[in-house]
Every structure is written in structure tokens, then in C-alpha cells.
Amino acid sequence: MEPKKGERTGKASIVFAHGLWADGSCYSKVIPTLQAEGHEVISAQNSLDSLEGDVAAVIRALGRVSSPAILVGHSYAGTIITAAGTIGCFAGDLSEAEQKLVWATQGVPAADLFNQKLEGTAWKSKPSWYIVAKNDRTVHPELQRSAAKRMGATVYEVASSHVPMLSNPSLVLDVIRSAAKAVQGATAAA
């Protein structure tokens, strides 16, 4: 049973934020395990029509859980997929049935989404973790490594397509657990 807001389990809360061509259900293979381990878990549903609106959705989700909270985000970049035949680049290491589910539940971003700007850069003041998907054909792995280095993130690499939370949920769970432990330890020491 998921704890109610404000009910402390002694574990960090986890808020998921999905990327393009997906919705909050893209974390369906990791959410139940984290809940069973006693974490409060929320997966935000982004509208993908404005950057400001998507940020607001995640902020609302963060407001529904207790602190400390881990924010887990999946790529907000990549190639716009316009036909089911191109899902092979996005989720090519998933079964055909899982690829069809990803395609059926995707959200369509606004055309100007990547041109929108907001103030603030959380990774400049908060610890970060990054999973590089080595077989990603949507966002090149070298670009991912460069972003992770710039962030000063703790980096994990996995032989995965663009969606490691679906193709390698056990690794994603391990990374989230590491982040939760680090945040819990920092909160306890403060």
C-alpha cells in the first residue's frame, strides 16, 4: 500500500517525469518494485505542449510526495517519431508487443517545444545521476556522455535503446536506489 502524503517511510520519495513520445506509464516496470520497497512514487503526466506546463506538472507531482524526493527524468530530447516504423530507433530492444504499447500511449509534443526557455538549472546545485543508453539511436550515446559530464553526474551505462526503464528496469531501479540512499544520507547528516 502506498503511503499517504506526509507519511514518512524513512525512504526517499520518487517522482518520475517522462520524455517525448511517452507518458507516465513508461515507468510501469519500476514503479511497483519501488512502491513495494516503501517509497512514495508519483509519475507526472506531461502534456508536451509547453515546457512551462510540463515543468508545472512535475512540480505538482513533487508537491504530492514527502521530502526528500528523487526526481527521475527520461530524455526530453530525440527525434520526433512520425510513424510506427521508426520506433525501432526509440525502443528497438523491446518486444513487438511492448513497442506497440509505447506507440499507442505516446504523447505528441508541440512543434516549438525545444525552443522554449525557463529559468533555473537544477543539476548546478543538486546531485545528479545519469544512465547512458549505449545502443540509443534517438539521442547519440556520446551526446548523453557529454551532458552527464557537464552535469557532474554519477554515470551508469547500459546496452539499451532510448528506453532503459522498459528494457533494463533492474538497472534503473538500482540507480534510483543509489540516488535515494545518497539523498537520505545527506538529509540525515544535515
Image (cartoon, grey):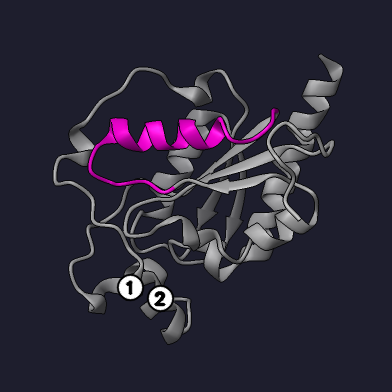
When asked about the image quadrant of residue 102, the answer is: bottom left
Please determine whether, in this image, residue 5 is positioned above or below residue 172.
above
SS label for mark 2: helix
SS label for mark 1: helix
Give the residue type that dot 1 points to. Ala
Residue 61 relative to residue 53: left or right: right
At a point 44% along the width and 39% down the height, the residue shown is 146
Q: Which mark is residue 101?
A: 2
Cβ–Cβ below 8 Å for labels 1 and 2? yes
Give the residue type that dot 2 points to. Leu
Q: Farthest left residue?
A: 111
In the rendered image, residue 184, in percent from the top left (x then y), is placed at 79, 31
* Mark 2 surroundings within 10 Å by alpha-carbon count, few (fewer than 14), some (14 through 19), many (20 or more): some
Please determine whether, in this image, residue 102 is positioned above or below residue 33.
below
Q: Which residue is mark 1?
A: 104
**Considering depth in this image, is 156 or 142 the residue closer to the camera?**
156
Please determine whether, in this image, residue 7 is positioned above or below residue 124.
below
In the rendered structure, does residue 184 fall within the stretch colored magenta?
A: no
Magenta stretch in the rendered image: 45-67
In the rendered structure, does residue 65 fall within the stretch colored magenta?
A: yes
When asked about the image quadrant of residue 100, the answer is: bottom left
